[in-house]
Image: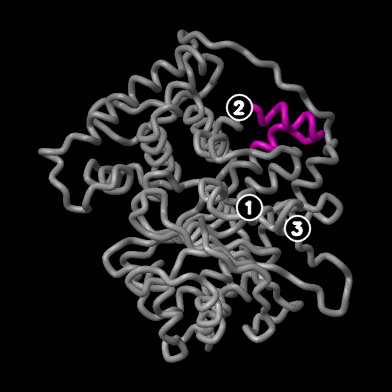
Amino acid sequence: MRVNGTKTDESRRLLVERVAASRYISKSARLHDLLRYLCERVLEGYAGEIHEQEVGHKVFGRPPDYDTGSDNIVRVHASMLRKRLEQYFASEGAVEPLIVEIPKGNYAPVFRERRESEPAGSVAEPMAAPGARPAGDRRILALSIIAAVFAISTAVLLVRGGAPASLAPEHLGPTVRTFWSQVFRGTQNTDLVVDDAAFGLYQDLAGRNLALSDYFDRSYLRTVPEAAQAAKLDAATASSLVLRRQSSYADVSFLWKLLQLSGIDPRRTTVVFARDYSFRELRSRNAILLGTPRSNPWIEPFLPRVGLRWLIDKATGASYPVDTWAGPEPKAYSGAEASESPEGYCAISLLPNLGSTGSVLVISATGGSAFNAAADFLADETSMNALRKRLPPAKDNAFPNFEALVRVKGRSSLPRDAVVAIIRPAR
């Protein structure tokens, strides 16, 4: 798997995101998904491997061996996309020096420079003084270094990590098995959706709160230069940052523990980056959503069912939970106070998916230690049995839908050190 691309690849990815965010593409989820999938395959070096059946399966949810002769969904949408691309580069994208085309009879997009005979506008880019680096640029550089450390740490974790004892098959009790059987159902696929750390960092640096609608159609990319200028960031560097495909170490650590659970069928389990997810999957599949709404916007549609919200402490940059259903006034839970054993929090919610055809598990936490505590808590029979007894019974002996806030002590992930601060049925 390729981790880093060239500067050319980054500029092309940014172009694709601008096209996907345009009014010609963004209003159609299928065309939006098709464009981004085809372009990403080309940028990853797999242009020669793109074929109709693969696209039908990966983009439109058709079975892997479906009959392309009787189902022309890919051909129809490829033709529509081809026309929309022509419209974009003739109007809204007339200033683009690079053009994306899908040649007839092929599904692999081609990136080419605009010919001199083709109309194009011109935009003067401000030039920075040689050797100068804006203060915001230095902050992004520091964050990039941190992200690289996360990536290296993740690789070490995956190579060195063994199966945690608490999640080993012989340690799973009946209540734990009942809980996880709703998330990993034998006949249904489950998506493990990791957060988009770059998206969260961009909001922090730009001082903006972006919604799922902005994230899904990429409309926020249109205002990256303005947001960068307001935050005193270099526009090109900010654009590069927001396109980076990085998740947090805490997410990966949680998933590594989770994948040791017995009964998980790897053929029906997929790890998905938040930027590649869509409403289609969230309606028809089971999912585990990791992060807060700020870094994983796919949590947003489920907020009306729960009372916990996550805010940012501007002084420390740390996230903390707030219970909006606590009473007349919301109650904040912060573990930022200095002490010998500072507290952390993890929020756990089990909810129906958007189509009520499966389950969604949402895990948010104040940090890596709290994420680890959530994994161990959800695999501990004593803890899960006590939690279930505090909820109204569900039909067919299923685990009831709920939201919980678990307080953990310092860096301890032992279930006996976890205290359930909130437990209630989800709406």
Q: Nearer the viewer, residue 48 or 342?
A: 342
**Which is more foreground, mark 1 or mark 3?**
3
Question: What residue type is disc 1 on?
Answer: Ala
* Residue 113 relative to residue 372: left or right: left
Residue 71 seen in render:
yes
Q: Residue at x 70, y 48 (%)?
A: 201
Alpha carbon distance from label 1 to label 3? 27 Å
Label 1 environment density (alpha carbons within 10 Å; few <14, some 14–19, many ≥20): many
Q: Could you say which disc has been placed on residue 222 in the image?
A: 2
Q: The magenta stretch spans which residues?
A: 223-239
**What secondary structure is found at the residue carrying circle 2?**
helix
Label 3 environment density (alpha carbons within 10 Å; few <14, some 14–19, many ≥20): some
Q: Residue at x 41, y 49 (%)?
A: 354
Name the residue carrying label 1: 197
Residue at the extreme bottom of the image, as rendered: 170
Alpha carbon distance from label 2 to label 1? 20 Å
292 part of magenta stretch:
no
Residue at the extreme left of the image, as rendered: 70
Q: Earlier in the sequence, mark 1 or mark 3?
A: 1
**What secondary structure is found at the residue carrying circle 3?**
strand
Question: What residue type is disc 2 on?
Answer: Arg
Q: Could you say which disc has been placed on residue 146 in the image?
A: none
Label 2 environment density (alpha carbons within 10 Å; few <14, some 14–19, many ≥20): few
Magenta stretch prevailing secondary structure? helix
Q: Could you say which disc has been placed on residue 331 in the image?
A: 3
**What secondary structure is found at the residue carrying circle 1?**
helix
Q: Residue at x 26, y 65 (%)?
A: 187
Q: Residue at x 45, y 59 (%)?
A: 360
Question: What residue type is disc 3 on?
Answer: Lys
Q: Answer with the quarter of the image where residue 365 lies.
A: bottom right
- Residue 118 picture location, percent across and down: 46, 10
